[in-house]
Image (tube, rainbow, N blue to C red):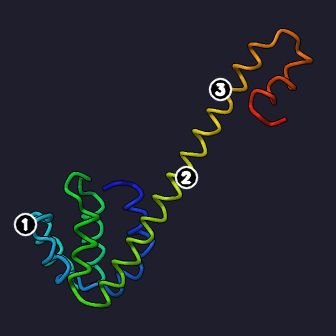
Amino acid sequence: MDELKQEAIKSYYAELVECMDPLRVMDRLAKLLSLEDMELIRESHSTYQERNRKLISILLRKREEREPFERFVEALKRTDASHENMAEAILKTYLWYDCVTTWSIAMNLKRLYLFRNMTMVLLSVRKPQDSLVLMLEKLDMV
């Protein structure tokens, strides 16, 4: 699973462990989970909290191509109203993380672009004392 999606789920780990109904959610993930996965969740853990931990652990390891995050959010939404609220919160968190990451990348690209432009200006100047003025003029900062 994609790292940002993992982080969104981990943000609600305690709530998921305490409040999620692991068997009802698991039933809605039948196309994603293998029979072995479902057996591990169903039989080897006695409390619902342990089942939830196992279910989350399995989901976090699924390949992104299988869309585990999207299927998990959809399974939560289709379980009941309280699970739907958890799904919405997880989805909003992921969208926030994605927005922040995209903005951060954009700012880094902008810095690289400005650095490249300043370097090109500095390399084109023959007299060092003129470099700052020329650089600011070329960057429309004067």
Secondary-structure class at tag 2: helix
Is 60 or 118 nearer to us in this picture?
118
Query: Which one is closest to the eye, mark 1 or mark 2?
Result: 2
Is 138 or 94 nearer to us in this picture?
138
For disc 2, the marked residue is: 103
Q: Crowdedness of circle 3 by 10 Å Cα count: few (<14), some, many (20+)?
A: few
Could you say which disc has been placed on residue 35 in the image? Answer: 1
Measured along the vertical axis of the image, is residue 25 above or below residue 106?
A: below
For disc 3, the marked residue is: 116
Report the amino acid beneath label 1.
Leu
Q: Residue at position x 68%, y 26% from top?
A: 117
Query: Which one is closest to the eye, mark 1 or mark 3?
Result: 3
- Answer yes or no: is residue 112 visible: yes
Tell me the quarter of the picture where residue 46 sits. bottom left
Report the amino acid beneath label 3.
Arg
Q: Crowdedness of circle 2 by 10 Å Cα count: few (<14), some, many (20+)?
A: few
Q: Earlier in the sequence, mark 1 or mark 2?
A: 1
| Left or right side of 26 for 10 | right
Is 87 or 59 nearer to us in this picture?
87
User: Which quarter of the rendering shows the N terminus?
Assistant: bottom left
Whole-angstrom CA distance, mark 3 to mark 2, is 20 Å
